[in-house]
Image (cartoon, rainbow, N blue to C red):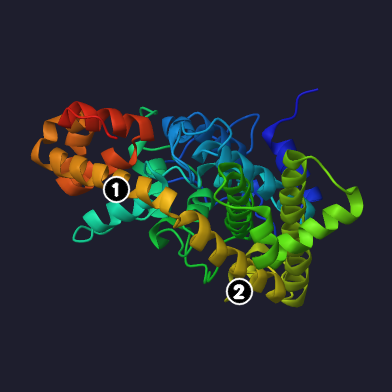
Amino acid sequence: MVRSREEMELAERRALAPYAQFSADSRGRVHPEPPPPHRTEYQRDRDRIIHSRAFRRLEYKTQVFLNGTGDHYRTRLTHTIEVAAIARGIARVLCLNEDLVEAIALAHDLGHPPFGHSGEAVLNHLMRAHGGFEHNRQSLRVVEELERKYPGFPGLNLTWEVREGLLKHSLPRRSETRGETGARSPSLEAQVANLADEITYYGHDLDDGLDSGLLSEKELELNVRIWRDAARSVRREHGDLPDECRRYFIVRCLIDSQVGDVVETSEKLIAGAGVGSVADARRQAKPLIQYSPERRKLNLELRRYLYRNLYRSPEVHVINRRDERMLQQLFGHYLAHPAEIGHQSRRRASKIGLHRAVCDYLAGMTDRYAMQEYQRVFGAERF
């Protein structure tokens, strides 16, 4: 038996909450296209994202530790897949649109430059007189302009709702909507993807930090209550476990408790706000997908600990500083030699300016390609 798009849309109406974003109610695409016969609109978006070049490049972009420094460290791609899994789980329990949540989650880091957040910081500094650089907005640029796969339009021509979800703190341009909505918040699906990102990178960065030796279970148990609670729970239920199994299971329990807190808190907030439609959810002044106040406090403690002991550790910081200098030097070189940024980038430069075109070119690089370019241009080993 084959299901048509219309049957899938009807199944959504029957299964999802009234405040979910239904595929049939999408505000559409900038460039009109015939609807897919055997996929919903958000399923089409998900597939376009997965088949994009920008998505494939995430495999060779840094999460915390430089790509290639360890076989088991997360990359942007593995992080993205983990975000999508957690986001779908939350959406399923809350009866929201899983396909929309998954599409947003899979696209949320497409705009990340090489070398993680340090790469983002240096590009923002270099572009300070030309509009700055921020990876969420760059993700939107990737799907709206920079991907070139279709003859009739630039970008991936994703639905309004997916593009909305890529901007964590604002809505897409009003001119692309069907009239003024009075929206003050993005869809609940966008909110789920945003919080799933936070749950994922804190939980799994803990795991990578322990693998690297920069973090220790003993110090975590002394200084981070959320870790201490999860560790004690694992000991009570399972006794002494081998090191790798114990660490994995503590992180798993920590993430599980985060998800449970978000589901329980969000369900209460949605009910308390009297939300009965997606329009009601959008009119809320504050997000309805949230942690409880106590959990938020615990997460802030974890965040501060990770910044102090992992993200800003001397071992990570030294590598970050080298990578930042590399991007700075490449940026200056391409400004002086624009012929080296490729035909498409040169064409865009006449419309958006050379600085933005160079920034786009650098932001699209993987870690290893940036290193190769640095060696080619400057004739020296990076290290």
Which label number is shown at residue 284? Answer: 2
Regarding residue 101, the answer to whether it shows in the image is yes
Q: Amino acid at mark 2?
A: Gln
At 43% from the left edge and 48% from the top edge, which residue is drawn? Answer: 315
Tell me if 53 is positioned left or right of 70 in this view. left
Vertical relation: 53 (above or below) 80: above
Q: Pointer 1: what residue?
A: 324
Q: Is residue 38 above or below residue 172?
A: above
Q: Residue at x 68, y 54 (%)?
A: 217
Considering every residue shown, the one lying at the far top of the view is: 1
Q: Residue 366, can we see it?
A: no
Q: Nearer the viewer, residue 103 or 383?
A: 383
- The N terminus - image quarter: top right
Choose the circle earlier in sequence order: 1 or 2: 2
- What x and y, as percent, mark residue 171? 46, 62
- Asked whether 373 or 198 is in front, the reply is 373
Q: Is residue 219 left or right of residue 11?
A: left
Question: Quadrant location of residue 226?
Answer: bottom right
Spot occupied by residue 166 in the image (x, y as percentages of width and height): 48, 52
Of marks 1 and 2, the one in the foreground: 1
